[in-house]
Amino acid sequence: MMSITEKPEILFYQNLGQLFYAIAAADKVVRKAEYDALKKIVLDYWKDYEEAQDAYDEPVAYQMEIVFEWFDYESMDAQDCFDSFSEYAHEHPRAFSKEKRILIVKTAEAIANSFAGKNKSELIMLTKLKMLFRKLSSQ
């Protein structure tokens, strides 16, 4: 039986949505291909990663798409979003198992690669993400 997720898990996926939006918006433009890449990875990998569901019986992984779409609609600042994700990660390092960190980086790289390859802004943000995870795993 699947359980309805407590807020901390939903918050985890919402923060991932914020991170993936930051990667896509690093160059100031979020393209359909980037959003499509996120949707495909959520469907192919994240949706079945955890059995937890939200209050609407949807896999919690869909929270990533919801936040990504909302932040794009609101034209949020990519660096602010990355900083907020980084702060969350520092406050909840145990939420980021090695397996999850690998999948997060894989997802971020797929988004960055989805439209004409990675540009400088996206490469910088991907490097910051990898540095953040190295720091978390050494704590």
Image (cartoon, rainbow, N blue to C red):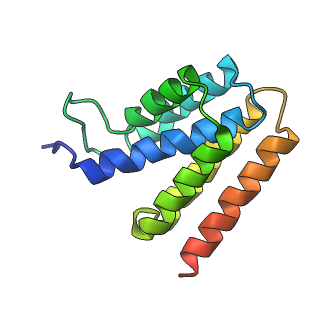
Of residues 63 and 103, the one drawn nearer to the viewer in this rendering: 63
Q: Is residue 81 above or below residue 59?
A: below
Pinpoint residue 43: horizontal percent, then vertical percent: 46, 30
Pinpoint residue 56: horizontal percent, then vertical percent: 21, 27
The residue at the point 69 percent across, 33 percent down is 25
The residue at the point 16 percent across, 45 percent down is 3
Say which quarter of the image contains residue 63. top left
Q: Judge from the rendering whether residue 81 lies leftward or rightward of residue 52; answer left or right.
A: right
Q: Judge from the rendering whether residue 128 lies leftward or rightward of residue 6; answer left or right.
A: right
In the rendered image, the residue lying farthest to the left is 1
Pinpoint residue 110: horizontal percent, then vertical percent: 68, 38
Q: In this view, does 133 lie above or below 63?
A: below
Would residue 50 be visible to someone looking at this image? no
Q: Looking at the figure, which quarter contains the N terminus?
A: top left
Q: Judge from the rendering whether residue 58 lies leftward or rightward of residue 98; answer left or right.
A: left
Q: Judge from the rendering whether residue 30 lies leftward or rightward of residue 27; answer left or right.
A: left
Would residue 33 be visible to someone looking at this image? yes
Pinpoint residue 139: horizontal percent, then vertical percent: 53, 82
The residue at the point 66 percent across, 39 percent down is 78
Of residues 100 and 44, the one drawn nearer to the viewer in this rendering: 100
Say which quarter of the image contains residue 120. top right
In the rendered image, the residue lying farthest to the bottom is 139
Count of labels in the image:
0
